[in-house]
Image (spheres, rainbow, N blue to C red):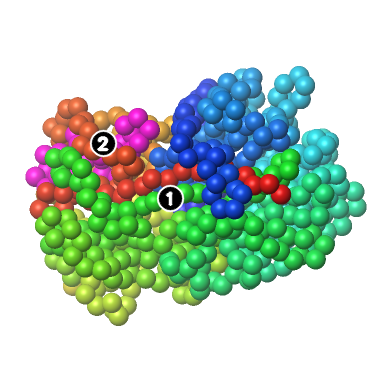
Amino acid sequence: MGDRLMRNLRLVLLAAIASRVVLPHAQQAHDNPALHRPDAGDATLVFEQPSNLWFEGPLVTVSVSADRNWALFNEEFEVHLISLTRRRADPEMLRGGTDGVAAASFCGSDLIRLAKRGQEIGLFFPTPQGPVLSKLPMDANPICSPDLRRIAFYRTGEQDRSVFVGTLESYREYPVNGKVISLAFSPDSEMLYVLVFQANGESTLSSLEVRTGKMNVIANHLDASPVEDQMGVSSDGKRAYLALASDGSPNDAERQNPRAERWLKIYEMDLTTGARRRLVESPGQDNSGPAQIGDSLYWSRTVLHDSIIAVPAAGGNAKEIIAGGEFPMWSPDGRRLAYFFGGWRLADWALNLDDAVVNVNENMRRASEPSIIVAGNHEDFPPAWSPDGKWIAFHSHRSAKPVPEYSAPGSADDIWLQLANDASAPEKRLTDFGWETGSPYWSPDGQRLMFVSWERGGKPGVGKVYILTMDTTAGAVIKTEMLPLGPQIQSVRSSAWSPDGKEIAIEDDSGYGKRALWVIRADGSHPQKLADYEGTSHGGVDWTRDGKAIVFAGLAGDLLQIFSVPRAGGAPVQLTHDSGNLMHPRVSPDGRWIACTRIVQSKQIWRKPL
């Protein structure tokens, strides 16, 4: 899912700024009492920005201005410009005379903006007279040379595998063998360094002589992330700073391993010999985006703590069941909870997610050690048990052999079926048309499976509801249909069957953080809106066991919490007041508990002297 977001981000953002004058303001950055506390060696924590996102949180990119006074946090649908001196967001400075900014990057201490101004939409570059619209492609990812006389860029997506170097008026194209994930100029602006992720999962760092166009390989077989990042060059031009998972070649089998210690570290590389040494690491956390500014190295760190918790259905305090898990699913008897684990490692984005299950007692105490229930190459989301307990259905990007990255050929994106109590039973692929497919859910009668997916050939990012009618004896699909939802429902994020199977609750994404809770009949007809609310990511919905209320995750201030709204209509009631973000609510079969994902995460900016 992460690579998909990176590929489609700019198209979605451009549609957003075309249809709305000003994007939402950045959230207020929170002060942290631990600021300037030494972390390891002589490193110092400069700033921390909490996040209420889900998997999108680790994908937020962070950069610091050349004068060290500003930081950019580029999120999925908005960007925050933070004053590091005043320790708060400055949306007016971010706009800089435009009507709305969708993404930004530093050009020295000023900004390149993907923005809208009047009827103009595109990439605006800074000038003494203010931002000027360029003729660069709107999907370009540009950087400025240190002397501000040149630019370089690559284009987002798989269709373009080239680097472009020159000026705003004239630039040349240089093909590369793979997907560009980072660019950096030398301090004298005469050399461009290019980090490319190749189809075999290895990365290559090369230099491009700006005046001659000559390209030289500096280092092959690098263990970099396929996710776009920033790299830095030392002030003397002799060393590069980049994020790698290891100092050796990547191993595709290890990429799929949930327990592999393949978190990104910051390395210093000799640009003459390719020799490298590790400068920064923090087990269980990714470090990325290194840059030398003045006499210090700056970088960002992703801090994420996730767990499966349970709260009383009427509201109250959470009980942690398992640390390091997300997306709970109940067994029919309510005695087991399945979830995925592995963490959102940027080097192996989503490849390393497998599923485990634990036993729980009636008081939501864990009654067993975790055991694996679904595992294999690439991403696995937790299984849904059929009501009779015979089958488990799950979403997976299953691949026959280990793959190097999320969108690699040979990966599925579909719904799978397996006998619930036979780990050696074959996995049956039920669909072959998935595109960012979500988890499936059984109807109460056990005859249908429902899931959300984008429509192939349709608009990216628009979720549709699909129903599979099942032959539960053979474990085969009898009929596949997409529910004919009306135009009121714009993009489904999640859905849930009512206890009698006659209705479906839907989390609808209206854009700009706006969510709507709908109820439709099982055939997709008669939509009824129950609530409008603020949300992020895939918050999730479920029904209480008596069918009288629906629970969902929505924003309460800056945190996602669990709410309940009567099926008959009425005001939502906040059930939780947790210090973390709660999402993906699933009501227990006996109706007493709501299992949720709990996430506390942030992006930090660190520095250390060089």
Label 2 vs 1, first from the N-terminus: 1
Q: Position of residue 509 (x, y in %)?
A: 37, 37
Q: Nearer the viewer, residue 348 or 510?
A: 348
Crowd band around label 2 with a 10 angstrom C-alpha radius: few (<14), some (14–19), many (20+): some
Crowd band around label 1 with a 10 angstrom C-alpha radius: few (<14), some (14–19), many (20+): many
Q: Nearer the viewer, residue 195 or 49?
A: 49
The vertical placement of 70 against 380, above or below, is: above
**Residue at (36% x, 52% y) in the render:** 306
Q: Tell me the residue that label 2 is attached to.
A: 577
Judged from the image, the secondary structure of the residue bearing numbered disc 2 is: loop
Query: Is residue 371 a member of the stretch shown in magenta?
Result: no
Secondary structure mostly seen in magenta is strand
Residue type (three-letter) at the residue carrying disc 1: Leu
Q: Position of residue 214 (x, y in %)?
A: 87, 57
**Residue at (71% x, 36% y) in the render:** 66
**Residue at (46% x, 49% y) in the render:** 303
Q: Is residue 384 left or right of residue 340?
A: left
The vertical placement of 403 against 501, above or below, is: below
Q: Is residue 426 left or right of residue 352?
A: left
Q: Nearer the viewer, residue 458 or 538?
A: 538
Q: Which residues are magenta?
A: 540-565
Q: Position of residue 217 (x, y in %)?
A: 79, 64
Query: Farthest right residue?
Result: 212
The vertical placement of 315 against 371, above or below, is: above
Query: Is residue 548 a member of the stretch shown in magenta?
Result: yes
Q: Position of residue 308 (x, y in %)?
A: 28, 54
Please say whether residue 316 is visible from this viewpoint.
yes
For marks 2 and 1, give the CA distance: 20 Å
Residue type (three-letter) at the residue carrying disc 2: His
Q: Is residue 130 left or right of residue 387?
A: right
Residue 304's tag is 1
- The quadrant holding residue 118 is top right
